[in-house]
Image (spheres, rainbow, N blue to C red):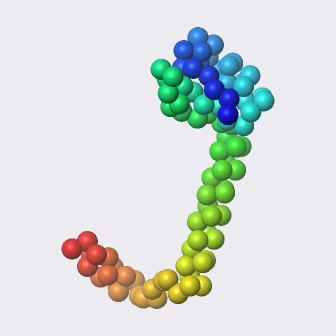
Amino acid sequence: MNKITANELKTRGVSILEEHLAENPEIVITVRGEEKYVVMEMAQYAYLRECELETALHEARADYHAGNHVAESVDEHIERLKNIEE
């Protein structure tokens, strides 16, 4: 993964991000030598978010097919949640 320092970002601004993102999907910004932030184009972020949602959907379907769910009314659900909080 491509890295730039916070100081490089401070001195060169957005132009350094555009330069590096033209060649890499993500850039790591380091602060005092420690990896601190990741910058990416919005399209890359949307793709990763979609992957997360697909994974969550797959896990939910697997739970449903494995019988790890509860069928109940809204009132029963609220009552069950109240009991969990106690």
Residue 36: x and y in percent read 50, 31
Q: Residue at x 58, y 66 (%)?
A: 56
From the viewer's side, name the closer residue of 1 and 14.
1
Q: Is residue 60 visible?
A: yes
Horizontal relation, residue 80 to residue 29: left or right: left
For the N terminus, the image quarter is top right
Residue 71: x and y in percent read 46, 88
Q: Is residue 10 visible?
A: no
Give the residue at the far front of this rendering.
Answer: 33
Give the residue at the far top of this rendering.
Answer: 11
Q: Image quadrant of residue 9?
A: top right
Q: Residue at x 66, y 57 (%)?
A: 51
* Number of numbered labels in the structure image: 0
Above or below residue 59? Residue 38 is: above
Q: Image quadrant of residue 75?
A: bottom left
Q: Residue at x 59, y 15 (%)?
A: 8
Above or below residue 78? Residue 26 is: above
Give the residue at the far right of this rendering.
Answer: 23
Residue 10: x and y in percent read 55, 15
Q: Residue at x 56, y 85 (%)?
A: 66
Residue 44: x and y in percent read 70, 43
For the C terminus, the image quarter is bottom left
Horizontal relation, residue 2 to residue 83: left or right: right
